[in-house]
Amino acid sequence: MNAMQQLLTEHMAIWTAADTEKKSGRGRASGNAGSVYGIKKLRELILELAVRGKLVPQNVNDEPASELLKRMQVEKSKLVAEGKIKKEKPLAAIGDDEKPFELPHGWEWARLGCFVLSITSGGTPSKSNSHFWNGNIPWASVKDLNVEKYLETTQDFITKEGLVAGSKLANKGDVIICTRMGLGKIAIAAIDVAINQDLKALKVTALLNVDYFINFYSTLKIVGSGMTVAGIRQDELLDYLVPTPPLAEQHRIVAKVDELMALCDQLEAQHSNAAEAHEKLVSHLLGTLSQSQSADDFSANWQRIAAHFDTLFTTEASIDALKQTLLQLAVMGKLVPQEPSDEPASELLKRIQAEKAKLIAEGKLKKEKPLEPITEEETPYETPTGWCWVRLNELLTKIGAGSTPLGGKQVYVNVGIPFLRSQNVWDDGLRLDDVAFITSETHNKMSGTYVKSGDLLFNITGASIGRCAIVPEDFVTGNVSQHVTIIRLTSNEILRFIHLVLISQHVQQTVMDVQVGVSREGLSIGKLGQFIIPIPPLAEQHRIVTKVDAFMSLCDQLKSRIHQANKQQQLIADALVVQAVAA
């Protein structure tokens, strides 16, 4: 077993445990297992060791790289003399201060331009000319690279006219790289393919193993320049230093890299299968929990799950799934027991209606059109005795979206009145680290979008649609954008419970079902106000909120523990990489 395989096997738990989860657009963990940080770092380490000469042993019988470089120069001179390639500008000599690390015996530093016979730059035919597009010539852009090692197909195709008018053809075997809009992306052309202006096709000498070139290029940290789009000039690209081994060693390196990358593939597959099995188990058990018929039934099912908490809820995704299950049980009346002595919700609703009538009589609230009665078909589940279904509008004195001030971002100031946008609204509260500000004058012109403490803010457009936050007591004043709706309750006694309902699966699924918009999700205020809301007795609402708070606190503690453990595993993985490179 060589040193690399020993490093891999001895620290297997680190490579596979240092996990990072992907996030969905709503800011919650998605259902998949996410990328494995440790294996990603392991792949980077394999390539780094490969180009430093630390992955396979050197062989003293190999022809040194200095001879290989001489033969490359002879090859280029011959091709220039035959008129097959252009004579290139001489590359700058390599100074000792440029060399980033020491090479093994028999290796040489060379500039990338030494290995390139010619470069083809691409282009894009006019998009407005239909005769240029949807032909049979594959046309590659940045999105087609870093999908597979070999570029075998493209998402777009052009015609012969399009090729003549605006693009260039790269040949099979060329190395395709991005020089802007995706620096570092690379692939080998497995077909003749047209390329766009963000790509270049490099014909690399056959005296260099093209797979070694790909492996080396993948280790580069290419930094572009430019005001709008970062890019790299051709002369800058050709100046990069390539640690060049003897040709025989290049072949051995490539074979070892392929072998170790296959092991990484196996690790990822095992991790993915284990994560998928874990997700199915959690989903099944939470399904059992969600089928609880009463608070007593929930308590019994919860005890069964609690006995295996440490093995079940080991990812942020599983904890988020648990949170949603608990919220749904809460709004179905299955989280806490009912008390026959509680005043029924119907009495609470009478008081809310009386308060609204009083505000209307005083001219503080407009009289609204009668709401449609709730039919039995509309209610998604049966509620306990003492509960009622109501339309959201019945509970409100205000529901309305904000607006963006004239001039948009140009009217934002460094200090002033908070202007809340959808990115500030999260289920666990307002996040004001990147809040925008407007002047008092602008604020006064937008009196219809004033926000005050106790309001509920609900996102009605975009990827964060459905997120909902309570405006805290210490919030003085502010405004909201047109992507956020202000929901103001007649009675703040029910504020916490209504918030739970709005972030529960019951309402979130309704949001998904009724939203409109092809390119951007959207929910009308009219439809939001018609949502049907379950209302328990007020005393039971308080018990539910208390219970949910306790469960959410437990979930947050679990998340924090997982986050800290992952961070620690990532630090260990990083340290192992540094140690291996330095060894």
Image: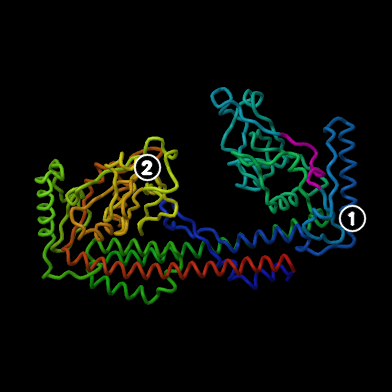
Residue 349, given in percent of the width and then of the height, sits at 13, 56
Determine whether 549 is above or below 156 in the image: below
* Residue at the image point whose x is 71% and y is 53% from the top: 215
Residue 273, given in percent of the width and then of the height, sits at 51, 62
Determine whether 224 is above or below 427 in the image: above
Q: Amino acid at mark 2?
A: Glu
In what quadrant of the picture does the C terminus appear?
Answer: bottom right
Residue 425, given in percent of the width and then of the height, sits at 37, 52
In what quadrant of the picture does the N terminus appear?
Answer: bottom right
* Residue at the image point whose x is 60% and y is 47% from the top: 147
Q: Which residues are magenta?
A: 111-120
Indicate yes or no whether the magenta region holds residue 66: no
Out of 38 and 551, give the one closest to the viewer: 551
**Mark positioned earlier in the residue sequence (1 or 2):** 1
Q: Amino acid at mark 1?
A: Glu
Residue 521: image tag: 2
How far apart are labels 1 and 2 at the CA level? 63 Å
Out of 163 and 525, give the one closest to the viewer: 525
Characterize the magenta stretch by its predominant secondary structure: strand
Please, what secondary structure does the residue beneath circle 2 have? loop
Q: Residues within 10 Å of mark 1 (few under 14, many from 20)?
A: some
